[in-house]
Amino acid sequence: MKKVPRLLVVVLPLLSAAMACVSNAPLVLGPAAAACASIGETVVWWRLPEGDERVRSDRWCAAVGPPAILRGAEAPPSDARFVAVSWNVHVGGGDVQALVNDLRTGRLTAQPERSFVLLLQEAFRAGPEVPRRVPRDARVARAVHPGGPDRVDIKATAQALGLSLFYVPSMRNGRPGDSDEDRGNAILSTWPLADYTAIELPLENQRRVAVAAAIRGGGDGDAWTLRLVSTHFTNTVGHHLWLFSEPARFRQARALAGAIDDRPTLLGGDLNTWFGYHDAAYKELARRFDAKPPEDRRATFSIMRLDHVLDRLPDRWHATVRRGSRKYGSDHYPLIAEITHPDLR
């Protein structure tokens, strides 16, 4: 077993003591704030409880557009296997179309993939749905535009690939005078999506909203439903205080775990686990999923393992998770989960 770095030996006990004092009320079901409300589709919202934290979160909400939902080509999926990719796409820096092309041609896995889902973080949406005018007290994030003018937003990406989409913005990507973009988490799928859910996480440095939706397959006597979750936890508290952000991530992980029940679920996300598998956010979710770290534990961002896939699959399904070998223009490597029916492998 590798030794824990000397810094962690000092820091982790202090953070553990801090987390023992962390408390937050559970999320509650309720309508979204006006600026975040869905248009034309039903989205279930898990929200922060009434109070100052919700008021501050709504100031971030006031600067973004509503969720985006698109219906894909809905080609008949295979029930023998499918692939799930969890990936932080760095606000358009990652080339989603290139990754999907490698999925479909078999370059990313051992065979061409017809059935897959993408659990994306830091996706962006541009256009008229993002409000041009925002209240004076609205909060926005610093604009991030990696990759220059060739960036393709998440709606155009889904349309070009013929995939179903569920996207919920967490924050505006720059001030109205500088940008017509918001950014957040997304799910893309070869299956039709259903049961759209937005989960507003405890507010730390920036507003963050996890997204969840369901896919269904099988036939009479062997039908299955799997809930998909894409999430992105905080990386700092205040400005640049990354070292002391673990209790904040733990708070978000606990809230997210409380909003999802024991149904079959596949969760992927950039958990910003500065301490890898020792990080309290990972351990909290792993406990809820009864999960263990995968065999492939390579870093996904710089020298750190920030990204994770956890699963609680339907009966007789099995998942193998590995890191991709290319970043496809992002600053994170994707995680690839190959999910198979044991009787058909």
Image: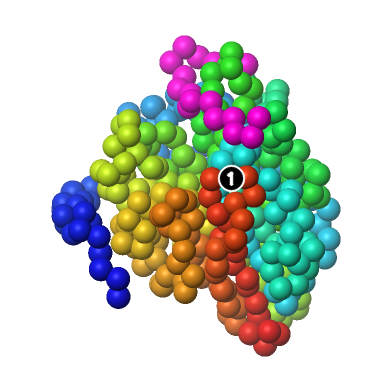
- Please provide the residue range marked out in magenta: 132-148
Query: From this viewpoint, is residue 189 visible?
Result: yes
Against 331, is 223 above or below? below
The tally of labels here is 1
Residue at 62% x, 16% y is 132
Image quadrant of residue 42?
top right
Tell me the crowding category of disc 1: few under 14, some 14 to 19, or many 20 or more residues within 10 angstroms, Cα based.
Answer: many
- Percent coordinates x, y for residue 261 in the rendering: 46, 62
Question: 326 or 56: which is nearer to us?
Answer: 326
Using residue 304 as the reference point, say whether residue 300 is left or right of it: right
Using residue 257 as the reference point, say whether residue 89 is left or right of it: right
Residue at 62% x, 45% y is 329
Question: Image quadrant for the N terminus?
Answer: bottom left
Tag 1 secondary structure: loop
Query: From this viewpoint, is residue 50 visible?
Result: no
Mark 1: which amino acid?
Ser
Against 267, is 154 above or below? above
Answer whether residue 142 is magenta in the image: yes
Disc 1 designates what residue? Answer: 330
- Percent coordinates x, y for residue 77 in the rendering: 78, 67
Using residue 204 as the reference point, say whether residue 78 is left or right of it: right
For the stretch drawn in magenta, the main secondary structure is loop
Question: Image quadrant for the C terminus?
Answer: bottom right
Against 241, is 95 above or below? below
Question: 131 or 219: which is nearer to us?
Answer: 131
- Percent coordinates x, y for residue 277 in the rendering: 36, 63
Against 247, is 319 above or below? below
